[in-house]
């Protein structure tokens, strides 16, 4: 993966705590991020809507904190100026705003779990699943992935005294990256040091 690539992240990707954590860690850990993240308020509104629908008992603060953390972490990546085309050909016309924003920001890649919804657009960006994208990051920066895995292990062990990063990634539909993370942890002897 030539770096830094511009990625536009769809709401269904941000919905996953696991994937939010990985993209955020890989973006913020190095001095120079290996990719640039783009997003819109429309996307964050969709994330919030679906989080609330799945977790009606969550406090307002919990939902707001997720939204604010995303906006703060990727502050320079907000895309405001885009026009949704009348002729968007995807199977879900509701995805037109994602397509339009990805084009407007010059995205190299669109990260989404719904790759088929964007496959026929002939857009100037590549459509990837989170698993495919994270594997590309690992190809380009394996030491960064190993460092992020160690840091995440420490975080979860301190917080809840247990951790299964590969299992969390498999549940987030990232089986190939899960295996790579497992390998990175084994290469380090399961050590949690930097």
Image (tube, rainbow, N blue to C red):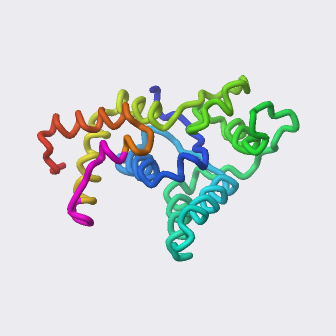
Q: Quadrant of residue 177?
A: top left
Q: Residue at x 67, y 57 (%)?
A: 41
Residue 160: say if magenta: yes
x and y percent of residue 6 in the render? Answer: 56, 37
Above or below for 178 versus 59: above
x and y percent of residue 133 in the render? Answer: 47, 33
Task: Tell me: 114 left or right of 100.
Answer: left
For the stretch drawn in magenta, the main secondary structure is helix
x and y percent of residue 109 in the render? Answer: 58, 33
Magenta-tinted stretch: 157-168
Q: Quadrant of residue 34?
A: top left
Q: Residue at x 68, y 33 (%)?
A: 117
Asked whether 175 or 148 is in front, the reply is 175
Q: Residue at x 33, y 37 (%)?
A: 178
Q: Quadrant of the N terminus?
A: top left
Task: Tell me: 145 left or right of 186.
Answer: right
Residue 117: say if magenta: no
Asked whether 137 or 161 is in front, the reply is 161
Task: Tell me: 32 left or right of 88.
Answer: left
Asked whether 91 or 95 is in front, the reply is 91
Q: Quadrant of residue 188?
A: top left
Asked whether 27 or 11 is in front, the reply is 11
Q: Residue at x 44, y 39 (%)?
A: 173
Q: Number of numbered discs present?
A: 0
Above or below for 51 versus 152: below
x and y percent of residue 96 in the render? Answer: 76, 41
Outermost residue, right side = 86
């Amino acid at each position: 993966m030539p770096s830094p690539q511009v990625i536009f992240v769809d709401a269904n990707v941000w919905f996953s705590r696991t994937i939010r954590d990985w993209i955020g860690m890989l973006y913020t850990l190095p001095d120079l991020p290996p990719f640039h993240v783009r997003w819109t308020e429309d996307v964050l509104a969709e994330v919030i809507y679906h989080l609330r629908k799945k977790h009606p008992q969550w406090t307002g603060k919990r939902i707001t904190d997720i939204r604010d953390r995303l906006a703060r972490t990727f502050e320079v990546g907000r895309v405001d100026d885009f026009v949704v085309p009348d002729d968007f050909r995807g199977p879900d016309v509701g995805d037109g705003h994602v397509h339009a924003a990805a084009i407007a920001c010059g995205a190299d890649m669109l990260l989404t779990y719904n790759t088929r919804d964007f496959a026929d657009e002939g857009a100037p960006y590549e459509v990837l699943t989170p698993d495919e994208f994270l594997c590309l990051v690992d190809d380009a920066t394996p030491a960064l992935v190993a460092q992020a895995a160690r840091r995440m292990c420490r975080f979860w062990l301190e917080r809840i005294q247990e951790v299964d990063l590969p299992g969390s990634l498999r549940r987030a539909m990232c089986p190939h990256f899960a295996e790579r993370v497992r390998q990175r942890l084994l290469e380090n002897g399961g050590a949690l040091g930097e």
